[in-house]
């Protein structure tokens, strides 16, 4: 359970005027009894007895105060002495027996750090959307009753219109599938998506030093948006989608709701979003969110024809002389103009897709028993992207066309033939 701070109690006092204590406790992620206890203490104005006890550093107040004043008047360019040095001085020269953390708390309480206000920003129509995950318990009959589901939220920063996609998991396949569904619901692609620091989007780092997930970056280039991860532990960097998350958790789906399956839950949620968007006001335009969304859709980029199939694994592979690439213990053919070039191989839910220069070249079924998946059309002429140094392979003759499998993984059971028939075929091919 989360811990409640003093400003949380102030918010809770306001919320319980409009809804039950149980629902308010769920908003803060605490137990109902914890909230009741804290509200009762606030009503009685109870004093925490720990605040009346003397601090471990009280006997050394003069030394600590002198150290703090010296740091307040440092000349420009001089680095302040670390607090660890003060602790070592107190312990070795003044007989301090308390802990380092107790000394740090003592100093921090008496040091007034400069306050930095938050910048409130509003983006242009179609410029940005914010993305977040949320976990919610929903009663779904197909899943056996109350089930904890992951909720993908995508909120347009200008109009505040949002889309919700329900999922059983938060892996790469689900991450990209939810992107596709949400963008389809909102009717276009914004220029920038501000995302959380999840491994499906960020490989390492954060903010200006972020290293993006290669697979997600490839998906973003294909769909047509730029990824913008926010800083670590700063949810206010995507406050608009955080506000949508609170709305979904408390209003969109209720504990009394019952759903037949995931499609039923998805459809009802979208209907409720459309209904609620006509009642909520967009603070930028002054009109309801739904009207503002209809206006913003004209600024969104159109969805690409055939959205990218969600994938959970992507690698770069060099095409060999025989026009094959290796992936997951199997070999796949690509069109011959790609020989000696690098292609992107994606492992999707049921297929393997191969891309070159951002364009899908071909696809195959995934994880088949067949270890060599060859499409003979990849060796025929007519493919774009070749150069004067790449010529089409030698074409099949009449005999080859009779005996070669067009697609090696689609072998049909051949009819029973006598040896004389094979001799006849061979003779006809000469």
Image: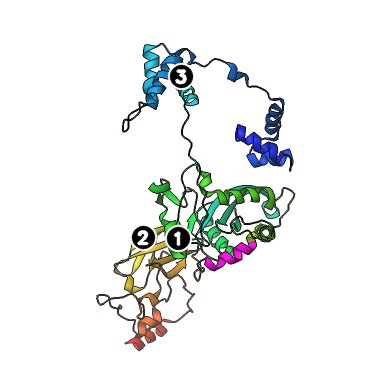
Residue 398 seen in the figure: yes
Viewer-nearest of discs 2 and 3: 3
Indicate left or right for 156 with 137 as reference.
Answer: left
First reached walking from the N terminus: tag 2 or tag 3: 3
Residue 69, given in percent of the width and then of the height, sits at 40, 22
Which residue carries the number 2 mark? 316
Vertical relation: 331 (above or below) 168: below
Residue 73, given in percent of the width and then of the height, sits at 37, 26
Residue 154, given in percent of the width and then of the height, sits at 56, 56
Q: What element carries label 3?
A: loop
First reached walking from the N terminus: tag 2 or tag 1: 1
Can you tell which mark lies on residue 410? Answer: none
Residue 4 seen in the figure: no
Indicate left or right for 78 with 149 as reference.
Answer: left
Can you tell which mark lies on residue 220? Answer: 1
Q: Name the residue rendered at 37%, 17% in the picture.
A: 89
Dot 3, how many residues are within 10 Å of its Cα: few (below 14), some (14-19), or many (20+)? few
Name the magenta segment's main secondary structure.
helix
Quadrant of residue 32 within the rendered picture = top right
Residue 27, given in percent of the width and then of the height, sits at 65, 42
Magenta-highlighted residues:
290-302
Dot 1, how many residues are within 10 Å of its Cα: few (below 14), some (14-19), or many (20+)? some
Indicate left or right for 354 with 254 as reference.
Answer: left
Which residue carries the number 3 mark? 99
Q: Nearer the viewer, residue 285 or 218?
A: 285
Q: Is mark 1 on a helix, strand or loop?
A: helix
Distance (Cα) linking label 2 and label 3? 53 Å
Q: Which of 378 and 389 is in front in this view?
A: 389
Pointer 2 with pointer 1, Cβ within 8 A: no
Quadrant of residue 156 within the rendered picture = bottom right
């Amino acid at each position: 359970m989360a811990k409640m701070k003093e400003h949380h109690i102030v918010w809770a006092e306001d919320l319980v005027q409009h809804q039950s204590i149980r629902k308010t406790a769920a908003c803060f992620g605490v137990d109902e009894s914890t909230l009741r206890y804290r509200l009762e203490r606030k009503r009685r104005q109870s004093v925490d007895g720990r605040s009346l006890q003397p601090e471990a550093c009280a006997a050394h107040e003069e030394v600590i105060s002198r150290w703090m004043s010296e740091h307040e008047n440092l000349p420009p360019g001089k680095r302040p002495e670390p607090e660890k040095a003060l602790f070592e001085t107190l312990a070795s020269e003044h007989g301090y027996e308390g802990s380092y953390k107790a000394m740090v708390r003592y100093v921090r309480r008496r040091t007034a750090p400069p306050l930095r206000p938050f910048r409130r920003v509003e983006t242009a129509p179609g410029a940005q959307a914010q993305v977040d995950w949320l976990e919610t318990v929903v009663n779904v009959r197909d899943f056996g009753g109350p089930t904890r589901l992951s909720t993908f939220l995508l909120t347009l920063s200008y109009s505040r219109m949002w889309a919700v996609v329900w999922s059983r998991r938060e892996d790469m396949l689900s991450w990209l599938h939810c992107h596709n569904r949400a963008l389809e619901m909102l009717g276009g692609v914004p220029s920038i998506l501000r995302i959380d620091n999840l491994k499906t989007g960020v490989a390492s780092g954060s903010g200006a030093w972020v290293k993006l997930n290669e697979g997600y970056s490839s998906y973003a280039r294909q769909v047509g948006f730029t990824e913008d991860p926010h800083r670590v532990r700063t949810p206010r960097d995507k406050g608009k989608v955080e506000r949508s998350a609170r709305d979904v958790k408390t209003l969109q789906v209720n504990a009394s709701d019952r759903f037949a399956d995931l499609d039923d839950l998805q459809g009802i949620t979208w209907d409720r979003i459309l209904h609620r968007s006509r009642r909520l006001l967009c603070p930028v335009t002054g009109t309801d969110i739904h009207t503002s969304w209809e206006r913003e859709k004209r600024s969104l980029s159109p969805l690409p024809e055939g959205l990218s199939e969600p994938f959970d694994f992507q690698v770069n592979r060099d095409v060999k002389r025989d026009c094959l690439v290796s992936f997951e213990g199997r070999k796949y053919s690509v069109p011959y103009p790609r020989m000696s070039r690098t292609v992107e191989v994606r492992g999707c839910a049921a297929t393997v897709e191969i891309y070159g220069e951002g364009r899908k070249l071909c696809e195959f079924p995934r994880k088949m028993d067949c270890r060599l998946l060859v499409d003979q059309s990849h060796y025929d002429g007519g493919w774009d992207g070749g150069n004067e140094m790449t010529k089409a392979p030698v074409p099949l003759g009449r005999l080859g066309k009779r005996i070669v499998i067009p697609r090696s993984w689609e072998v049909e059971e051949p009819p029973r033939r006598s040896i004389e028939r094979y001799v006849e075929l061979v003779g006809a091919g000469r």
